[in-house]
Amino acid sequence: MARLFTPYSLRGVTARNRVVISPMQTSQAHDGLASDWHLAHLTRFAMGGAGTVFVESTAVEARGRNNHGDLGLWQDEQVQPLARVAEAIRREGAVPAIQLGHTGRKASTQKWWRGNGALTEADAAQGEPPWLAVAPSALPVGPGWPTPQALGTAEVEDLVQAWGSAARRAREAGFQVLEIHGAHGYLIHQFLSPLANQRTDRFGQHRLRFALDVAEAVRQEWPEDRPLFWRVSLADVVDGGLEFDEMVDLLRSLKDRGVDVVDCSSGGGISSYPTQGKSVSNDLTFRAALAARLREASGLQVMGVGLVIDPRTAEGYLGAGQADLIGLGREALYNPNWPLHAEAALSVNRDYASWPQSYRMHLLRRAASADALRPSFSPGSAT
Ligand SMILES: Cc1cc2nc3c(=O)[nH]c(=O)nc-3n(C[C@H](O)[C@H](O)[C@H](O)COP(=O)(O)O)c2cc1C
C-alpha cells in the first residue's frame, strides 16, 4: 500500500489520503468575498482526488491583503461565500482547509499580471488605490518600496484579536483544518525577524510574542477536534535574520499552544537558516533534511511541499519519515487530477474506482477503446 494513499487522521478529522493542495493565492476576490470562480477552482482539486484542499491565504483584516483580489475573513459577510466553497470541497470527499494570513509591509501590491510592484496612483485610476501598509517597524520591504506604518502596542493587541475573530469565522464557514501563515516575510514572520522587528515594547523585546499570542487567540476559537497547521519559511539565507534555533523554540512553544503540523515552505528574505552554503531552492529535496530536523526537534507533524511532480518522490519522503503530508502547488494547477493519476502510477488503483462516479464507466470504455486503437497505451497510466 502506498503511504501517500493511506488515510491521515489528526484530532477529529480524517483525510482520505496524504495529498494536500497547498494554499495558492489567485487574486480573484472582490472586497475579500469568494465567488463562483473560487468555488469551481477549489472544488476541482477535491474532484481530482486530493485528501485536503486549502483555500489560499485569507486576510484577517483589510489592511493585511497583499492585493485587492485577496480573500478575507475580517467581517461576517465574508463567511457565507466561503461556506459554499467548504461544503463543495467536503461533498467531493476532501477535507476543506483554509489559510489565514496578513502580509504586513508586503500589503498594497499590484496583482501579478499588473506587475507585482507597490500600488501607485496609476493603479488608483484603474480602481485599485494603494493603502498604507502596517508592520512591526517602519521599515520597507526593500529600496524603492513604500515605508509601512509601525503598529502601536494597542494596535498589535487588536490584531491578535483579529486573528481570533477570523478563526471563529473559518469555523463558522465549516472548514476542518486551519493554517496560520507564519512564512514568506509576511506579518508574523516580520515580528519574528530582527531584520523587520526593531520594536522596544514587549512585542520587540520578545520577538516570538506576537506569534504565540496569535496561536493562543486562534486556538481559543478553533475547536479542539480540528487540526491547526503553521506555515514556516524553513530555509533562507539572509545575514542577521531569524535563526533556525529560534524557529525550533517557536515551534516547540506553538505545539504547547495546540499547533499540530508545521508546513515547511521557504523564503521571505528575513531569516538566516543553515543552508550549508547552498542558495535557497523551493524544491522539497532541498528542504527535506531541514524539515526532518524540525520534526524531530519540535515533535510536530510535517507537511513537505516544493516541486513535487513524481508521486514516487512523494512516497520516498513519507517512507523516510521526512514528511507526514505532501503539499502540491503548481503541479495541481497544471493537473488537478494529479492524485488520481498518482494512484494509478503507484498501482493503488488502476480501474478508476476513485474517480467521480459519473466518469468511471466512460473512462473504462475509453481505456478499452484506446487499448484497441493504440496497443501501447496502458489503461490507468499516469499520463
Ligand atoms: C499561484 C501561487 C499562489 C500561492 N499562494 C500562496 C498562499 O496564498 N499562501 C502560501 O503560503 N503559499 C502560497 N504559494 C506557495 C505554495 O503554497 C507552495 O508552497 C509553493 O508553490 C511550492 O509548491 P510547488 O512547487 O508544488 O508549487 C503560492 C504558490 C503559487 C504557485
Image: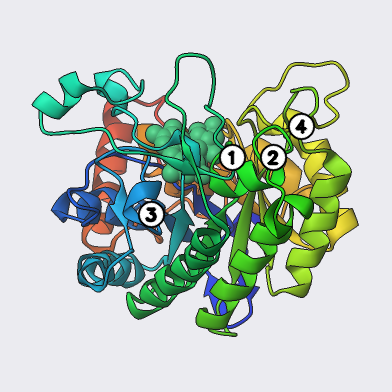
The answer to whether 366 is drawn above or below residue 140 in the figure is below
Alpha carbon distance from label 4 to label 3? 26 Å
Q: Amino acid at mark 1?
A: Ser
Mark 1 Cβ inside 8 Å of ligand 1: no
Element on which disc 2 rests = loop
**Of the pair 292 and 379, the residue shown nearer to us:** 292
User: Do the residues under discs 4 and 3 have CB atoms within 8 angstroms?
Assistant: no
Name the disc covering residue 157, or none.
none
Callout 3: 10 Å neighbours few (<14), some, many (20+)? many
Callout 4: 10 Å neighbours few (<14), some, many (20+)? some
Give how far across and how far down residue 199 sits, in percent: 68, 45
Element on which disc 3 rests = strand
Element on which disc 1 rests = loop
Alpha carbon distance from label 2 to label 1? 6 Å
For marks 4 and 3, the one nearer the N-term is: 3
Name the disc covering residue 58, or none.
3
Give the labeled residue for mark 4.
241
Alpha carbon distance from label 2 to label 4? 12 Å
User: Do the residues under discs 4 and 1 have CB atoms within 8 angstroms?
Assistant: no
Which residue is depicted at the point 17% across and 19% down? Answer: 122
